[in-house]
Amino acid sequence: MAGAPVSRDFYYPVPTLDRVLITFIVMTGFFMAILDTTIVDIVVPKLMGPLSTDLYGIQWVITAYMTAAATGLIFVVSLAPRIGYAWTFLSGISLFTLSSAMCGMAGSLPYMIFWRVTQGLGEAFIAASAQTILLAVYPPERRGLAMGIFGLGVSFAPALGPTLGGFLTDHLSWRWIFLINLPVGLLTLTGGLFFLPRAIGRTGRFQFNPVSYVFLTAFTVSLLILLSKGQQLGWFQSTLIGTLAFVAALSLVAYLASEFFSRRPLLDLSIYLIPRFGLTMGYQFFLLGFSMYQIFYLLPLYYENLKGLTTLQAGLHMLAFASCIGLFSILSGTLSDRFKPEYLLLLSFLLYSVVGIFLLPRLNYYTPALRAALYTVPLGMAIGTFFPPLARIVLSDLGPRTGLGVVLMHYQRFIGGSFGTAIATNTLTYRTDFHFQEITGLQNPVLVEKAIRKGAAFLQPFFPPSLALHKAKALMFRLETLYAASYAFQDTFRHTYYFALIGAVFLSLLLFRELYLARRERKGVRL
């Protein structure tokens, strides 16, 4: 069965050796940018002391990066046609490498935040151009393979981050999670200057709508800060969160009005009217952003906070999961050149459903760490099989609008991922409190008091009586909290799949459309 038809309007032929080198250069730069995101997430608590701040202050290290990357993507849509995607990529590598070096030398929170903003802009330039360059240098009949290779960066890098981050912080220092980008960035920049075709996507045009950009940026920044700070501030009990929600809603309405009445819109949103593009992007938004990103966020917390593993141990237990993502990304990409990518998406969803229904909800405190790692192996297979056919469908027939499609994919990844992380945080906190109340409410006070006194009696040979009693009560509280957290993780893992079911609606419509068109084609009706 042949793969989906693709457009040849966006193909720049290059020799095979050059294509291999371009793939290596582009993927090295993109992998570096995506990997750095999850590495930083893992070591954020270790930055509080060196940067003289608290947990709430250090969260701006992540929030600043995320908002800069999302808003930078929007600007790249206008800039890339002017200078070409090669120079866009090289500019991103330069920004990212320089800012990584500066972050590695940071000694204060404001200094770190400034350079994290610059680093986020660098990732925006890299993400928007890397995938477009890969699509341009691969012939249409081999673009599934190109998207499989690209899937290594999108899916494999976030899963590998905890392992590498744990190794660097345990054996070197937190500064090396930034400084390691310096040699990689310089190598990528040098290779790109020699081998990247400068003509890719360059039209000399710079169509930019500053009014729409201001409104869309205000919406993006307000929404991302709202989602990242909502749990900390008590959501809509906070005046700041309410204000941010109002600004986000008003900015979105103003942006849509500006685009509707403008002769030169910032983004050509009519691209969503292409059925395959619109349906697949809806599927990506909910499955990747709302569901998979919750799992990326929860797994390190499960291993470290509940199971008590170190950062490096947690990363090693996620290594099989990450390896399966990488392996199946390549395999799925190759298969999407030979078979209908819609059917590979269905296969991925079915496997993801098995994991989401039967395996992930089993993870609790008593699950052996090795068994937990084995449970995530089929999850890695499902995620690895997900991205290449999805990208193949989304970008297969956009022609000159391929760059816009790439930017919208990554913009949705940022927004959906932010929603997913916020939902996971809120669900985990709420269910922990719920189960703690349930556990303490159902306990027999007489038996609890008896257990505490027995514990105090056991500790009295080592501590004074009053301290022994205090420690016994603390142990009981710790046990209650542990049980509550264990049940909460099971609930939260279960809830991640509910959002996948929303995405399944879009997948079903996509499949029904494909079957309908195939049936008409078999009957000889001209499409």
Image (cartoon, grey):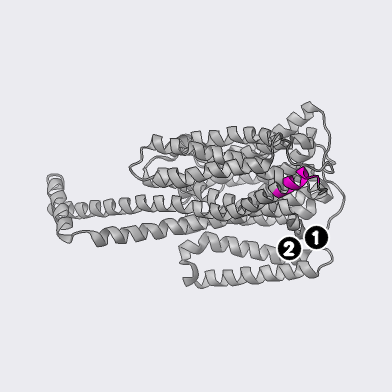
Quadrant for residue 96, please give it. top right
Q: Is residue 97 visible?
A: no
What residue did someone put label 2 on? 213
Residue type, numbered disc 2: Tyr
Residue type, numbered disc 1: Phe
Whether residue 518 is situated above or below residue 113 in the rendered picture: above
Mark 2 or mark 1: which comes first in sequence? 1
What residue did someone put label 1 on? 208
Front residue (pair 393, 53)? 393
Q: Secondary structure at mark 2?
A: helix
Taking the magenta stretch, the answer to whether it contains residue 77 is no
Q: Position of residue 2 (x, y in %)?
A: 74, 36
The reply to whether dot 2 and dot 1 touch (C-beta < 8 Å) is yes
Per the rendered image, the range of residues in magenta is 516-524
The Cα–Cα distance between marks 2 and 1, rounded to whole angstroms, is 8 Å
Quadrant for residue 308, please give it. top left
Q: Residues within 10 Å of mark 2 (few under 14, many from 20)?
A: many
